[in-house]
Amino acid sequence: MARIAQIAEDAPSRQLTTVFLKCLILRRAGRDVSALEEALYHTDITSEVFLDNLKIATHWIVKVAGVELLRDQVEHGMNTHILHIATHFSNLVKVSERVGVRHTAGSALVHTLSLLRRDQRNEVVVELGKGLEMGQYEISKYIPQYLGEAALYLHPSELDEQVLWLKTLLGSPNDSAVAGALNTIAVLLQHYPAYQQRFPERREVYEARRQELLGLLLQGLAHYREGVHQEALLVTGKLLFESPILDMEEKARLFALCYRKLFYLSQESASRDGLTLFYRASALAHINRFIAVRRLDHGPFAFEKPRKIAFFPGTFDPFTLSHKGIVHAIRDMGFEVYLAVDEFSWSKKAQPHLIRRQIVNLSIAGDFHVHLFPDDIPVNIANPADLKRLTDLFPGQEVYIVAGSDVVANASSYKAEPKPFSIHQMNHVIFRRAGEAELPAPLPITGQVIQLQLPPHLEDISSTRIRENVDLNRDISNFIDPVIQDFIYQNGLYLRDGQDKPMLGAGDLDFQWVDEIDSGLFADLAAIWPERANGLSIARSLTELQAGSFDLAVDGDLFKAVVSLPQYGG
């Protein structure tokens, strides 16, 4: 150690980073460093370090030492420029060309955040998050690791704002931005257990936020873009269930909450990319290892007791926030909700069945205790045999049919004579809009009936209003989820174009016969179709040279030229 200390003393001290490193070595060797500490802690050196760290010519090792120097300044209580130092770390995480500098700056940023005021923390985290919105992979690749940790130093109200921002980012058309959001959510879930010690709050609020974060991750698994689906599989397997940060009990709580959706969503999305097979295999391998270790060390999982079943059939064209509000209200009453998407509608021209089913799947992917009913089990509420089979699918559980008040009042199945296992004997959850007439008493239902009313803010949402706004290219995020809005606009859905081909009548055709094709007519045709002018000229010249005939038929913006030449015997 003495030799190392001697080499350090003899080294020139032309740069602040050199002075800092010499101070660390000599202090550990027990030498007098008062002169070096005077230069480091009693003069303002932050602006000089800032300049060196942002210069391209500065070696990356010097930049790492500069970051450590700034962190040391903060630890020694020099808080005059602490906000600027934290912002500088944030900039280095986003723009530094060296991975080592980014990781050092990110670690220093997370360490520094606890010393900032509440408003300063929020400012730094928001500024760091802007790197994800840019959607450039080379910038956003290393941001999620530190953005997720940094966000957990925010006050609960600011953290909820960040979660809402991440939800909006999941609807971005840029795959890199969505991938960054998914990775940030996974890091938030990894470090979330420490949040309760920093900001004590009611257990219900803490759990609700964790469920929302996990739901956002599941939305990625249901995403219609293959790249996003693959990234969600990678994040779920590697960063969640293979994470060395989360303990086994925390992973078990997450798994017990999402196991149904996890395995359903990993298989439901139709894969057009063969690479997805390997992503899925990798994710399932991580989950399988977790399950095996958990069962070996702690025994079987503890799952919730079965809940009451609510069967909600409908066209869902499209699945709006109004439908979602009804589903949430029923779920919050203790039901497990199953949504059955009708194959077609007799009363309106709906989008294809698989399109509507995909929209529903995207919308409910993050909602726990809400599921899509299997397509291969058709259920017609007017068929008693189908209703008996539906009841038999859930032995020991009460099954309720969800229907609107207009359906109960007008559907033919309710007006028919009651039979064994008919719709009249089923339990019901009936919802109605404000202003609709109440159902007459007694109802044609002998089972239990629960009546709900839509909240006022969901009353005005309808597929007609969605079509009007899509036609005008307006924002429809007030009617549906942001990711559904992106799906609709990307695929050109719900445009109010005529679905029937127009009938062709005699008045739509215009014929004009010309006996002699003169130069004036050719000039008019060449002006209309300049790209075909040369072809017309060649056809005309050939006809004149061979004493043939030239017929020209024009229909709208298309024409056909027929050249007839005399036949000569040889």
Image (cartoon, rainbow, N blue to C red):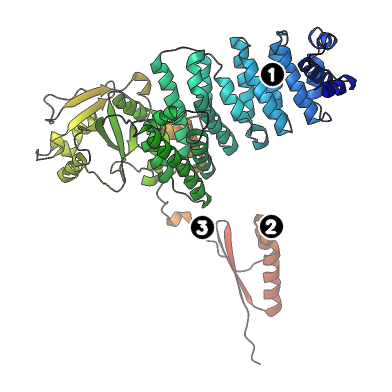
Residue 181 percent coordinates (x, y): 55, 31
Given the image, on which type of amino acid does mark 2 rest?
A: Pro
Whether residue 330 is situated above or below residue 281 in the rendered picture: above
Given the image, on which type of amino acid does mark 3 rest?
A: Asp
Quarter assignment of residue 539: bottom right
Q: Residue furthest bottom?
A: 570
Mark with earlier residue (2, 1): 1
Quarter assignment of residue 68: top right
Left or right, 334 with respect to 291, comes to: left
Residue matched to label 3: 510
Left or right, 106 with respect to 246, comes to: right
Residue matched to label 2: 530
Q: CA distance from mark 3 to mark 2?
A: 22 Å
Q: Quadrant of the N terminus?
A: top right
Q: In the depicted view, which residue is nearer to us: 48 or 285?
A: 285
Residue matched to label 1: 87
Q: Do the residues under discs 2 and 1 have CB atoms within 8 angstroms? A: no
Residue 430 percent coordinates (x, y): 23, 27
Residue 206 percent coordinates (x, y): 43, 18
Crowd rating for badge 3 (residues with CA inside 10 Å; few <14, some 14–19, many 20+): few
Residue 212 percent coordinates (x, y): 44, 26
